Image: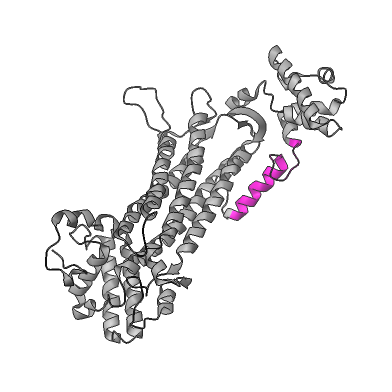
Amino acid sequence: MNRKLWGGRFRKRTDPLLEAFSRSLSFDRRLFQADVAAGRAHAEALAAAGHLTAGEMRRLTEALGEIGEDIASGRLGTGGDHEDIHSLVLDELVRRTGEAGKKLHAGRSRNDLVSLDTRLYLREAAGSLRAALADLQEALVSKGEEYADLIFPGLTHTQHAQLVLFPHHCLAYVEMLERDKGRFADASARADVMPAGSAAMAGSSLGLDVRLLASRLGFGSVCANSMDAVSDRDFVIEFLGACAIAGMHLSRLCEELVWWSSSEIGFVRLDEAYCTGSSFLPQKLNPDSAELIRGKTGRLYGNLVAVLTVMKGLPLTYNRDMQEDKEPLFDSAETLAAALPLLAGVVRTLVVDRSAVERALAGDCSAASDLAEYLVARGIPFREAHDLVGALVRDCLRRGRGLEDLTLEDLRRYSAVFAADALGLLTPEGSLRAKTTYGSTAPAQVKRSLRRWRRKLGRRSEG
């Protein structure tokens, strides 16, 4: 059994049940790179404060680097009986450097160390997820460019509402993902405050230069209150919140892909590489990639709620309950990191069936709002225009006609204000061209938006 970092005042051995129940190495081993980096910076700070010689500092930093490499390569296993990653690294350091290794933990506690390691991990995870979000954005922009002229039904309440360009629909998700990137940037910025030097909760008397530590570890600032430093998990909660919201956005897109690829709708065909079959039904091509991503969104929600619940009743400062933030954090980061490139692949390889979309638009009444606004532009109050066009649509549906089948004589039965130019609104192309507001689906606007996002994402269109 490895000697505990806290074992000095204890005479009894820990009950094996507690030993197993409290061990966190199986999951916090993910922090080994952060723990090694924190240890090397701490050795430098101890040397600067006169608590290590230059030679001791050099041996410690070299040994820590080797430990990190050995863990990464698998030469040093992390499946043993150490309590956590911090005790494993320190025990291995003592084994390799002797007395010098025993000095490293001076001026710090696992309370501030675990916060430090978690912040380092989170900053890197947030950066990786932002890059993966950008890759999915690029896939959506590319797909929008591929079908730049495709007119698509825009829905409210899952009913045809107004016509849009397919790339306009794709760009709606690009905008959502951009907000997700911003949330991860915010979470990373909130984590970019260094807690080292806070020790257990009140600080250290060893004169450590925390500004030096912050500089070596790339932190923008230092925690101003040692009690808050060791008890704060807001940055974890914000990160989990960003994961949950991003998961919700992915789930919405996946729901549409599942729906669009159904036998009844058939707007898109998903590539076989992203589908599976049935063990009983030979004909099936199931959109499992989209369904699984949609399903895993529940895990992202649950992880956020779990940590909020852990933190809700904790007094200051550190409490062992806070160990329960790690598994949700790692699970959310890894779940989203796996889902994003998978969904990008789904989007890049899907094929839109133009004929199925065109059939869905036959007899469509989505230009109704354009007719109402046509009347408004000619002085008729909107409420009255709405009623007139509503009656017109009702009669079309009763007769089995679409708006595109109407003549000028048909229109003028409802209002003498209609002139020949109103007929241009009854075609899908005319409906799109009628839009003038910024951010609308007007072809010129969508074209500019595609160009803007292509520049912003900085990648050339594929194919």
Q: In what quadrant of the picture does the N terminus appear?
A: bottom left
Residue 10's image quarter?
Answer: bottom left
Q: Residue at x 47, y 33 (%)?
A: 270
Q: Residue 86 at x, y = what percent?
A: 27, 66
Residue 19's image quarter?
Answer: bottom left
Image check: 350 left or right of 63? right
Q: Residue 332 at x, y = what percent?
A: 39, 50
In the image, farthest residue toward the top: 399
Region rendered in magenta: 433-456
Q: In what quadrant of the picture does the C terminus appear?
A: top right
Question: Does the magenta segment cover residue 437?
Answer: yes
Q: Residue at x 34, y 80 (%)?
A: 44
Image check: 19 left or right of 423? left
Observer-nearest residue: 87 or 441?
87
In the image, farthest residue toward the left: 12
Q: Does 344 appear above or below 109?
A: above
Q: Does 417 appear above or below 224?
A: above
Magenta segment's dominant SS is helix
Observer-nearest residue: 463 or 119?
119
Residue 425's image quarter?
Answer: top right
Q: Residue 401 at x, y = what percent?
A: 71, 16
Question: Does the magenta segment cover residue 152?
Answer: no
Q: Residue at x 41, y 28 (%)?
A: 285
